[in-house]
Image: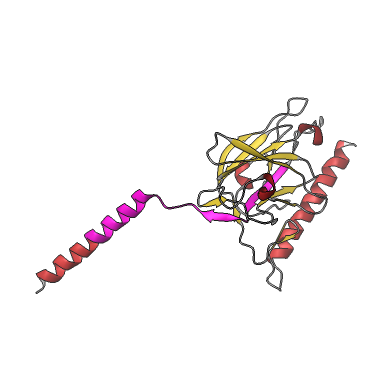
Amino acid sequence: MSYSFHKNAHSAIKTLGACLIAFGSASASGSVVYGGEDFTGIPVYFADTVVSYDPLPDINGKLPNAGSDNPKAALGAPDYVSSGPFYASLGVGGSLVLGFKDRYLTGSGNANKDLWIFEIGLPEAMTVEISKDLNEWFSVGEAKASSGKAAIGIDIDSYGYGPSAFFSYVRLIDVAGDSELRCSTSTDYCFVGADIDAVGIASTAPVPVPTAFWLFGSALTLFSLFGKRKADLARI
């Protein structure tokens, strides 16, 4: 396949994904659609922290660039538009680690999809791993978008992780043999590897507020009440 055809197809599918997202946000029925998947009535929390981004080069040593190398673009809800750098290419065999500050990813106890990955461009496979502490990682299989539908759902219960399992991090690793292996040799534009727009979790639990925070808050409340009481007595 020629690079020019590849690039045009890549751009066309990205544009289709952007249209699907825009359609959902503007739906008169109030539906919520991300990447061609209906999330109406399903709270989805999106990654809010970039832990690491390690894109690897193509066989000619070229790395993703020209706006496809922005890991922060993978934070928040899917928002790719063709006029802006709103995705992160993994490169050939590269990786991206994202985190969630306020919610844990958990299993749902059923066959519902718990973890969602939003890929744009030509569908390319990636290995998906989850972690509690960034030290030990657990595989939840491979993910690959279907043509015209950017959302990829994973049921982590099917891998043995139910409602009592809590995870804060997701790692995506490009499957090198399933992606394009080289960038253009006639232009500096490079977007090799799976292209990530967002990562979301639908089965979640809140991250507990640290005890120290509550103690500090309680102390401030007591000081406030004591000060008010003292002021009231002074006016008597």
Residue 31: horizontal and vertical position, in percent? 69, 68
Task: Name the foreground residue: 50 vs 187.
Answer: 50
Task: Name the foreground residue: 60 vs 44.
Answer: 44
Residue 219: horizontal and vertical position, in percent? 26, 55
Give above or below for 112 relative to 65.
below
Looking at this view, name the residue that lies furthest to the top: 60
Taking the magenta stretch, the answer to whether it contains residue 207 is: yes
Does the image show residue 95? yes
Q: Is residue 101 left or right of residue 58?
A: left
Give the residues in magenta. 195-223
Taking the magenta stretch, the answer to whether it contains residue 201 is: yes
Q: Is residue 165 left or right of residue 30?
A: left
Residue 21: horizontal and vertical position, in percent? 72, 59
Q: Is residue 177 left or right of residue 154?
A: right
In the rendered image, which quarter contains the C terminus? bottom left
Does the image show residue 180? no
Q: Name the residue rendered at 60%, 36% in the picture.
A: 137
Task: Name the foreground residue: 142 vs 125.
Answer: 142
Q: Name the residue rendered at 57%, 35% in the picture.
A: 136
